[in-house]
Amino acid sequence: MQIKWTDIDPESGGRRFLCAERFAGVWSFKWKVQRRGDWTKGLQPTREMWDHVLDSLQRRYRRREGVSEEDIVQVERIIKALPHP
């Protein structure tokens, strides 16, 4: 499962493309600067990124697009475990 979106790069202030991918129950994040560029793996997700993933999963779950309740619960647990700013 992949969730793709864009946000603002905190270093350059420009647009960047983000992708959260779940494979075998493990989430990984990657990014790129250009739409047709290569993905750079190993991005450390922020709380805002996890919130976006949770929101996307909840919307897909309502539309029955291959998201299970366990997927949502897994991301909610990850968010709860994050330190509060």
Image (cartoon, grey):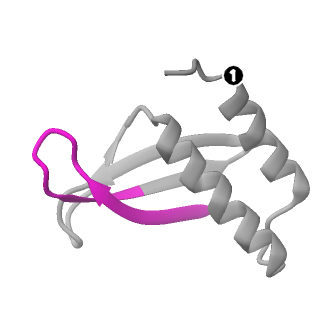
Where residue 19 appears, x then y in whole percent?
44, 57
Which residue is outermost to the right? Answer: 69
Query: Which residue shows up at 48% across the image and 43% down it?
Result: 48
For the stretch drawn in magenta, the main secondary structure is strand
Where residue 14 appears, x then y in whole percent?
14, 57
Query: Which residue shows up at 64% across the image and 50% down it?
Result: 22
Say which residue label 1 marks: 81
* Relative side of 38 to 23, left or right: left
Up/down of 57 relative to 60, above or below: above
Where residue 10 appears, x then y in whole percent?
21, 41
* Relative side of 83 to 4, left or right: right
* Relative side of 64 to 22, left or right: right
Which residue is outermost to the bottom? Answer: 63
Up/down of 64 relative to 76, above or below: below
Q: Is residue 6 magenta?
A: yes
Q: Is residue 72 magenta?
A: no
